Image (cartoon, rainbow, N blue to C red):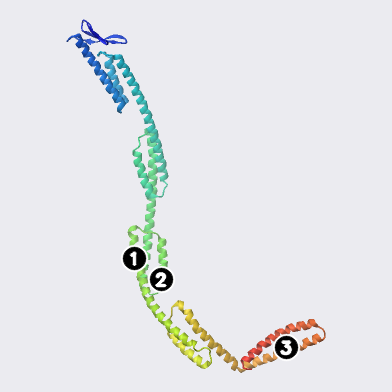
Amino acid sequence: MSSDPWGRVDETGTVYVRTADGEKVVGSWQAGTPEEALAYFERKYEGLVVEIGLLEKRVKTTDLSAKDATAAIDHIRHQVDEHHAVGDLDALRKRLDKLVETVEARREERKAQKAKQTDEARHAKEALVAEAEELAQSEQWRAAGERLRALVDTWKGLPRLDRKSDDELWHRFSHARSAFSKRRKAHFASLDAQREEARKVKERLVAEAEALSGSTDWGVTAARYRELMAEWKAAGRAQREHEDDLWNRFRGAQDVFFAARSEVFAERDAEQAENLKLKEELAGEAEKLLPVTDLKAARAAFRSINERWEAIGHVPRDARPKVEGRMHTVERAIQEAEEAEWRRTNPEARARAAGLTGQLQDAVDKLQKQIDAARAAGNDAKADKLARELEGRQALLDQALKGLQEFGG
């Protein structure tokens, strides 16, 4: 009979292994010596040790699923329980039990981790839905559209939840995107309609602008172009493919008109500058007639100057008041000289002036006598009242005497 600490072989070739529950039959060995029998079953034990070691390493260092690990443990445990090896089988059982605990701990850890990931995914998807629903009301069409597309990509990268929760959140998310797309489509449809209306209005404005481009009614046409420009701005933008072409035609028509007007105005300005020079010379010639000493000669000379003045065309608007003012000054001086001459030589006027002066002189003399009489009688109040009346009559008399002197009287 042969034996070692963990097993023995009896005389019949039966191999036993020692366990905590006593000896267990391992098998029968008839092909060799008892030592060879023990060595064979000890090698089977070492194989189990190696297999358990490899499984422990896999559980520790890889993402072996709990299900696969449990199946592998059960497979090895079955071999251990079959007692087909010689060695410390109880130690193997303990290692397998510990490995079961490790696998269960890993299972719970993964379960908790998955629950955490699911919870995080739920919060992330709820946040995506909330942002999508807010973006659904936006009118920043490009930015909001790009952001919604980015949210879809983010959604795809998140883990799925339970079917009901995932479907409910996706329905809200999808509804928000659809609502935004519907609003954007309606907005651009309205915008297209507005732009088409703007195109029609601008086509009409262009047609009128082009029709006016050859006008020589400078003031009226320039004013109408300003009105057309205001209407153009109020019309809004047409479609991009039409806007630039319409604007170029509209602006081109104005340019034709204003270029022609500028050319005409430049010629007119040059002509008016020459006219101003001529009128300044005439104003200087007229000013030499002052002061008027010979009314008849001055009147004839001024008439000749004025005829030449009228024959000259317009002068620049800003220079007109000054040069015309100089002529008016001379004209007024001649008119005043004529009025003075008329008063001096008019017999009827002289007679009226003399008669008025006489009447006023009589009234003044009469009031003076009344004042003297009142004071002599001691009636100062009446005298003061008459004196105030006398002041007024005296002033009228002085004025009449001055007028009479103009007649040489």
Q: Which residue is mark 1?
A: 249
Marks 2 and 1 in Cβ contact (< 8 Å):
no
Task: Specify few, some or many for label 3: CA neighbours under 10 Å numbering under 14, 14-19, or 20 or more.
Answer: some
Point out the residue furthest to the front here.
5
Q: Is residue 314 left or right of residue 342?
A: left
- At x 34%, y 63%, the residue is 246
Q: Amino acid at mark 2?
A: Ala
Q: Amino acid at mark 3?
A: Val
Q: Looking at the image, which is closer to me, 238 or 365?
A: 365
Horizontal relation, residue 336 to residue 124: left or right: right
Image coordinates for residue 33, horizontal then vertical, percent: 18, 9
Q: Whole-percent x and y of residue 11?
A: 21, 5
Would you name the residue on which mark 3 appears? 364
Measure the C-alpha gap from mark 1 to mark 3.
88 Å
Q: Quadrant of the N terminus?
A: top left
Packing grade of label 2 (10 A; few <14, some 14-19, many >=20) is some
Query: From this viewpoint, is residue 258 visible?
Result: yes
Which numbered disc flags the more N-terminal residue, 2 or 1?
2
| Residue marked by disc 2 | 222
Of the two numbered discs 1 and 3 on the same chain, state the one appearing first in sequence. 1
How far is disc 3 from disc 2 in space, using C-alphas? 71 Å
The image quarter containing residue 84 is top left
